[in-house]
Amino acid sequence: MDVLMIHDVRKEYFDLPLERYRLTFDDGLYSQYYYYPLLRSLPEPLTFFITTALIREGPARPHFTGRFLDHMKTGVYSFRAHIEKDLEGFMTLEEVRFLAEQPNVRLGAHSHFHDLVLTDVHPRKPKPVSPWKSARFKDVPEPLRRGLSIRSRLAFRGFEFRQGRLVPRSQRDWLDDIRRDTELCLGWFETHLGRTPNAYCFPFNEYSPPLIEVLRSCGFQEFYASRSPKDPGIIGRMDIDSLP
């Protein structure tokens, strides 16, 4: 059965034959909680991958009762969260707790910080840089950024900006960053939900052998990326927006 990747949920998705797929949801967005009443009867379990630093304290807000929300593109809610520090588009702790108690729901990890790094490793299919990603490195002079890509801080070693120049991040610092992010993520699950997830969805769907090695050492057993990779140990997903 094909696995779908979903970010902000929108009205049009409910016109699709969702029952034919396994649904996974990234980032921990409020719309995923809001529309749960329309998803609870699907035959396959729902997997929500939570970015733990973006979940704040607060009460549960209303579920869907007939009014559809305005859809937010990934770049919009990412800019609000990472640049403006506005987390209204994400679930509160009580909303995550509600989902955790549902019999057809599984929670997985989607990192703690979901952060970025400048790197000279370029994607196979370059895309226009989202404004929020550019804003993340606004303090780095444009000439220094020229020729570099902005990618997952966990998946790529990349560069640090120090004293006016870009310095290659050491292998040790890179691995330490992966471990710290993972420990904070797992600590959040244990503290707030009393559980340890064993499924992990890579931020930006990007991964590398050092990242996977650290995640396995921390107990993760199941890994998700955006498409069917050559690595049989990773579960590939289709973007729901790619469906006809």
Image: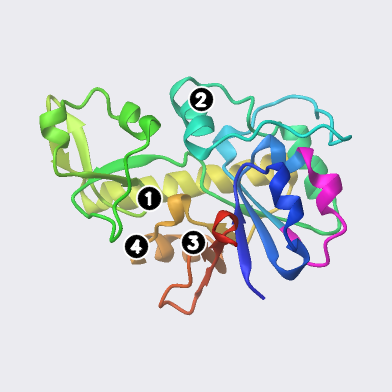
Q: Nearer the viewer, mark 2 or mark 1?
A: 2
Instruction: Name the outermost residue toward the front.
Output: 244
Residue at point 56% right, 21% down?
86
Q: Which residue is mark 1?
A: 154
Report whether 183 appears left or right of 133.
right
- Check disc 1 and give the amino acid type: Leu
Residue beneath disc 3: 226
Q: CA distance from mark 4 to mark 3?
A: 19 Å
Label 2 – label 1 distance at C-alpha: 21 Å
Q: In the figure, 46 relative to 180: above or below?
A: below
Mark 3 vs mark 2, CA separation in Å: 23 Å
Looking at the rendered structure, the kind of residue marked 3 is Ser
Q: Which mark is in front, 4 or 3?
A: 3
The residue that label 4 is drawn on is 210
Whole-percent x, y for residue 36 in the image: 81, 46
* Dot 2 or dot 4, earlier in sequence: 2
> How many C-alpha atoms fall within 10 Å of the one at disc 1: few (<14), some, or many (≥20)?
many
Q: Determine the residue positioned at 65% across, 38% down.
A: 29
Would you name the residue on which mark 2 appears? 80
Considering only order in the chain, which callout, 3 or 4, is on the residue closer to the N terminus? 4
Circle 4: residue type: Pro
**Disc number at residue 2?**
none
How packed mark 2 is, by other alpha carbons closer than 10 Å (few <14, some 14-19, many 20 or more), is some
Q: Position of residue 174 (x, y in %)?
A: 30, 49
Residue in the image at 30% along x and 42% along y: 117
